[in-house]
Amino acid sequence: MHFEVWTKGLATLAVDCIVVGIFEEGELSGEAQSIDSASSGRLKKLLSRGDFPGRAGETLLLPDLPGIQASRVLLTGLGSKKNFARKSWRKAWSAAITAIGRTRIASVAVAIDRPDSKELDDYYFGRAIAEIAGTAMYRVNDLKTAKKPKAPAVQRILAGPVRKGGIEDAERGLEHGAAVAAAQKVQRDLANLPGNVCTPTYLADQAKAIAKRHTSLKVTVLDEPAIRREKMGCLLAVSQGSAEPPRFIVLEYRGGKAETPPVVLVGKGVTFDTGGISLKDPPTMDEMKFDMSGAAAVLATLNLAAELKLPLRVIGLVAAVENMPDGKAVKPGDIATSASGQTVEILNTDAEGRLILADALHYARRFNPAAVVDIATLTGACVIALGHHHSGVMGNDDGLVRELVDAGVRADDRTWQLPVTEEYAEQLKSNFADFANVGGREGGAITAAAFLGKFTQGLKWAHLDVAGIAYQGGAQKGSTGRPTPLLADFLIQRAG
């Protein structure tokens, strides 16, 4: 899709469709009033019949309004004017572009009145236009054999109105938003694939393909013998029950000076998680193909950094394994020695993500990083705590955690800070090893982070538990593409 801004003359724009917002009870927004004036009051007359109440999420397509250059006008509900804010604006644009995607409309001018600029400035306006359009136009990469429906026809989107002084910011927002949407597609395509396709080897091959597209990216893939040489005993303990060999992926973006300390992103890449010997219940186990969403987000974010040529060094580390209950599988009570030399009593083989991350986080030390952020669908406990709206963020550096929280607010991909104090680490005590991999039901998301904290001492580190937000189940089953927008904003802000 091609994005650009418009500044004035809405009624004269040569596009297939204009999108304007309508408040509840048929009250016209500012741009809708300009369309009404150009059409000699036709809009008010239509609304006076009560056919479009303006409720949030509703749309109505009107063809051939007189006095309007565009062949159609799409009304999108803004809800109550009193409560109109950034969230309701996003909902209105999302509903509109989704409706447009079901038509053969090829060009659109967006004229949905914005909330106060403090809530949605020109940059984030442009970025939201492009990101939401990308999300709405995404089609699941299914393996169905039936004839595929036609792709959406939308090719050109004009965003406005933008004042003259805000054009540069809005255009930059559109560029960044399009890159974020493309990165989300990378994440969603990977995560939506079944476990028999998206294996650790497949993830490594995709990392190589991403690196091949950008000269600023360098990839190194460690196979099982190389992983063994790195003494990653925790990672190998998880993978030993699977016929699929593990892979450890190092994807380096070289956008900054070589001596600049990098940001290291670490992704959990469990391409399928049965729980191992601590077998999961069969219902919804199919969703465990999404347990590599953290890895997919890391690959997607490195791709975005290269696309935008961010002046940063970013290292992506992906620990890719499959967790299976074979006769060779690790057993509850087994003890593994991590790459850091610390020993772990594995009381629950379904707490495997933290094991592979432990070795990956230790590997990050060799880069002398400015910051380390791991991303993982780590615990069901985080879903219980925060539901499917916020990811959980924890860490040992309050400044880094605050950066991620603020990035989530700006990107509308929110996260919520949970505490990681020393009391939680005490729950991990073991009689037989340095510590155990689980600490009981209480505070499960936090004790998982406390476990990771054992391997991040001396690093500026934060942990994103995305178990509740990386994918949806039920009828809408599929990857959401989160937290790629949050990670994108975090890096864009660091790049200045």
Image (spheres, grey):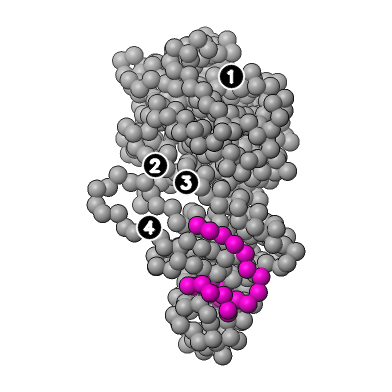
Which one is earlier in the sequence, the residue at label 3 or at label 1? 3
**Mark 2 sits on what residue?**
192
Identify the residue shown where x is 47% and y is 30%.
Answer: 208
Residue stretch in magenta:
1-24
**SS at mark 2 in the image:** helix
Judged from the image, the secondary structure of the residue bearing numbered disc 3 is helix
Side of 200 relative to 420 (left or right): left
First along the sequence among labels 4 and 3: 4
The dot on residue 185 is 3
Q: CA distance from mark 4 to mark 1?
A: 43 Å
Above-or-below relation of 331 to 16? above
Look at the numbered disc 1 and give the secondary structure of its residue: helix
Q: Amino acid at mark 2?
A: Asn
Q: Which residue is mark 1?
A: 363
Of circles 3 and 1, the one toward us is 3
- Vertical placement of residue 367 versus 468, above or below: above
Which label belongs to residue 157? none
Label located before the other in sequence (3 or 2): 3
Closer mark to the observer between disc 3 and disc 2:
3
Disc 4 secondary structure class: loop
Percent position of residue 415, x then y:
61, 44
Residue 171 horizontal/vertical position (percent)? 65, 57
In the rendered image, the quadrant that contains the C terminus is top right
The kind of residue on which mark 1 rests is Tyr
Q: Which residue is mark 4?
A: 151
Q: Nearer the viewer, mark 4 or mark 2?
A: 4
Whether pointer 3 and pointer 2 mark residues with C-beta atoms closer than 8 Å, the reply is no
Q: Residue at x 38, y 49 (%)?
A: 140
